Image: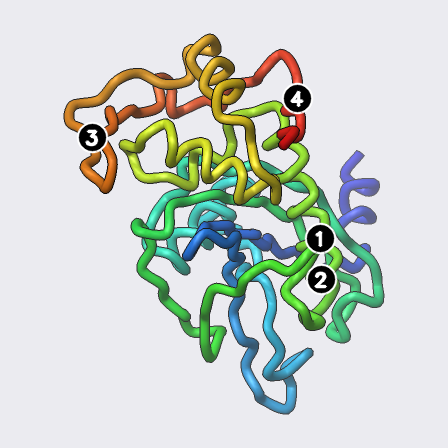
Amino acid sequence: MSKNLHSSQAFPRPLTTVDVVIFTVIDDQLHVLLVKRPTGDSEPYPGMWALPGGYVDIERDKDLEACALHKLKEKTGVVSPYLEQLGSWGNARRDPRGWTATHVYFAILPYESVELHSGSHATDIDWFQLKDDGVGHELAFDHSTILATAIARLRGKAEYTSLPAYLLPDTFTLSELQHVFSVVLGRPVDKSGFRTRVLSANLVEEADGVRSGYSRPAQLYRLKTPQNPTYFPRTFNPRKD
């Protein structure tokens, strides 16, 4: 047995990283957080924009999710109210430094809660507005493919879960909740049908206070069980004008 164990340790090990696709809404548009890679001669894809992430720290990270959480906290200063594993990508071509595998998570958080930090391995960090299934230009490594997958996952799950609610602050109006669903889905959502779905699913409960605006004050709500997303029994139907 010891001989087999010794033989298995003799195999070359791939580089292992964790990347995080971080979504928010700014000015009624869905955005993703990107970091600009260093420009040194030894750096792969120097100066290109990429998803935030990095190598697994085997002394610090007890598992992949712990690594994703600390990368997220490192870049945004907050812990996302929602984090989900998106998938894994790995081959001998995605990184010129050698055979690499990355395990990708996606996070959703309200813009108001974020304070960006570039860290020691990025020269800049910023939010980029999404355009269809990307940001309008190629990203480093295979991150354009990863981002497109994450966008599809978020929009797909917005059809039948409460995920877009995590883009809002702790308290919100029903109109604000409906609007953020429309932003994520990329189309209008019928008002009466939306409110019926939200209230019948016990997604929200009344919070103290109202939101004053141009019309009459609107009741504030909060998520009833913010630690878990709500699953709706059917998908949304496009609004018929």
The nearer-to-camera label among 3 and 4 is: 3
Q: Mark 2 points at which residue?
A: 144
Sequence-wise, the earlier of marks 2 and 3 is 2
Q: Name the residue under label 4.
A: 235
Q: Do the residues labelled 1 and 2 touch (CB within 8 Å)?
A: yes
Q: Measured along the vertical axis of the image, is residue 109 above or below residue 219?
A: below
Q: Could you classify mark 1 by the number of other residues whose Cα lies within 10 Å: few (under 14), some (14-19), or many (20 or more)?
A: some
Q: Residue 178's spot in the image, x, y percent?
A: 46, 32
Sequence-wise, the earlier of marks 4 and 2 is 2
Q: Mark 1 points at which residue?
A: 148
Inter-mark Cα distance, 4 to 2: 27 Å
The amino acid at mark 2 is Ser
Q: What residue appears at the point 70 percent right and 55 percent down from the top-left corner? A: 133
Q: Residue 172's spot in the image, x, y percent?
A: 30, 33
The nearer-to-camera label among 2 and 3 is: 3
Could you tell me which secondary element the residue under label 3 belongs to? Answer: loop
